[in-house]
Image (tube, rainbow, N blue to C red):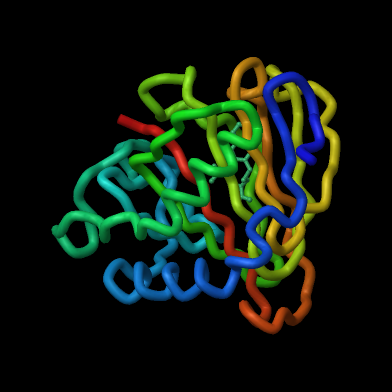
Amino acid sequence: PPEVLEPGALVLRGFALDQAADLLRAVGQVAAQAPLRHLVTPGGLGMSVAMTNCGALGWVSDRSGYRYDPIDPDSGQPWPAMPARLRQLAGDAAQAAGYPGFVPDACLVNRYAPGTRLSLHQDRDEGNYAHPIVSVSLGIAAMFLWGGAQRADKARRMALMHGDVVVWGGPARLRFHGVLPLPDGSHPLTGAHRINLTFRKAG
Ligand code: MD3
Ligand code: FE
């Protein structure tokens, strides 16, 4: 059963476990068309997380800022379509967490190598905060940081393991969050990496 983290936020431990290999195959097909890359922040630093997208909209960052874009700036082509099994999994997880009817139009693929971290931030580039965000963890486990409504609020730590799905909606939608540096390790499906899929309704 889903475990409530706080009102609006639920973790579904192992929800994606039986589909993990299929999901990673689909991610491989996406990355063959739209390769993983290190985006540059508006401040000019390269992000340590490697990213790509599938779906009608993709999250991108460059010197001019953050945005959702229908075009992959590296190829000049639309992002690869969101594979049906990915969209289906996100919808099923949202439903299991109490958010029926979630149809994501953006799937951000984050790849963490050993030492890669994601500093504390909010997800606020989406058009409508009424929709939840669904996140799927695959491969090496990471320590997730989950804070409050203010950057300075004390953050809790939670291990996110292969196959775990987290749904963030309602009052939890704008929580500060991040990921601690990925430990060294080896996973049969992802090697030294962690792959995180983040599904959003961005448009
Ligand atoms: C809590 N990704 O892509 S997923 C991101 O593991 C991002 O790659 C992390 O933060 C990762 O923006 C965390 C869990 C997550 C995603 C979105 C959230 C937690 C969230 C939105 C609001 C609150
Ligand atoms: Fe985020």
* Most foreground residue, 124 or 86: 86
Above or below, 199 relative to 95: below
User: Residue shown at 41%/52% (left/top)?
Assistant: 40
Q: Quadrant of ligand 1?
A: top right
Q: Residue at x 74, y 81 (%)?
A: 186
Quadrant of res 154: top right
Q: Position of residue 12 (x, y in %)?
A: 72, 45
Q: Where does residue 182 sit, x and y in percent of width and height?
A: 73, 63
Residue under the point 77% across and 50% down: 13
Q: Is residue 52 visible?
A: yes
Furthest residue in direction left, as rendered: 76
> Image quarter for residue 188?
bottom right
Asked whether, in this view, residue 59 is left or right of residue 94, the answer is left
Residue 58 x, y percent position in the rendering:
33, 47
Q: Name above or below for residue 198 compared with residue 50.
A: above
Q: Nearer the viewer, residue 173 or 72?
A: 173
- Viewport quadrant of the C terminus: top left
Spot occupied by residue 15 in the image (x, y as percentages of width and height): 68, 53
Side of 110 where 82 appears, left or right: left
The relative height of residue 141 versus residue 135 in the rendered view (above or below) is: below
Q: Quadrant of the N terminus?
A: top right
Taking depth in this image into account, of 5 and 182 the one nearest to the observer is 5
